[in-house]
Image (cartoon, helix red, strand yellow):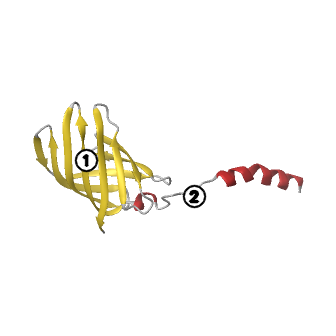
Amino acid sequence: MKKMLLLTLALAPSALWAQPQLCPRLNATLNGTYLTRFTGTVNGNPAAFLGLTTFDGQGNLQSIGTGNFNGTISRSPSSSTYTVNGDCTGALTLGGAFHWDMVITPDGSQAYTIQTDAGSIGVMHILVRIGP
C-alpha cells in the first residue's frame, strides 16, 4: 500500500501539468484547399506569391500560383511536405530547399508560417482554408 501511495504521489504532478493537445489530429488538421499568399525579402530581393495550396491531411501538399521574385514572374506547380504537432506548431518544406515554421489554428482553418532559411527576412505565408 505504501508503494502504491508513493507511486501515486510521484505521478500526480505530471498528470496535473499535462496539457491537452490543441491539434490532436496532427497532420490531418490541415486538409483541403487554402488560399495562400506570402511577401517578404529573400537574399535582399523582394518576393511575393499568391495561389492555392491543397493539403492532403497526411503530410503532403500541392501548390499552384504566381510568384514574383525580384521582378521575375513564375507560374508553376510544386509539391512539398509538412508536419503538424499536437501543440498546433509545425514545419513546412518546399521542394526540399525552403523551410518554414508554422502555427495552425486548432480547427485547421488557418495557418501562418515564417521562413527560417538564411537570407530570408519576414517571408510569411498566410493560409486560409477555402474548400475541402
For the residue marked with disc 1, what is the amino acid? Phe
| Disc 2 packing (10 Å; few <14; some 14–19; many ≥20) | few
Query: What distance separates the C-alpha of mark 1 from that of mark 2?
Result: 31 Å
Q: Earlier in the sequence, mark 1 or mark 2?
A: 2
Q: Is residue 75 toward the left or the right of residue 116 in the image?
A: left
Q: Write down the quadrant of residue 56 in the picture.
A: bottom left
Disc 2, SS: loop
User: Residue at coordinates 26% horizontally, 45% vertically from top-left?
Assistant: 95
The residue that label 2 is drawn on is 20
**Above or below — where is 123 with respect to 20?**
above
**Numbered mark located on residue 76 in the image:** none
Select label 1 or label 2 by which is in front: 1
Extreme bottom residue here?
132
Disc 1, SS: strand
Pinpoint residue 79: horizontal percent, then vertical percent: 25, 52
**Numbered mark located on residue 38 in the image:** 1
Can residue 40 be seen here? The reply is: yes
Which quadrant: the C terminus? bottom left
Pinpoint residue 125: horizontal percent, then vertical percent: 29, 48
**Above or below — where is 11 with respect to 34?**
above
Which quadrant: the N terminus? bottom right
Q: Nearer the viewer, residue 43 or 78?
A: 43
For the residue marked with disc 2, what is the amino acid? Pro
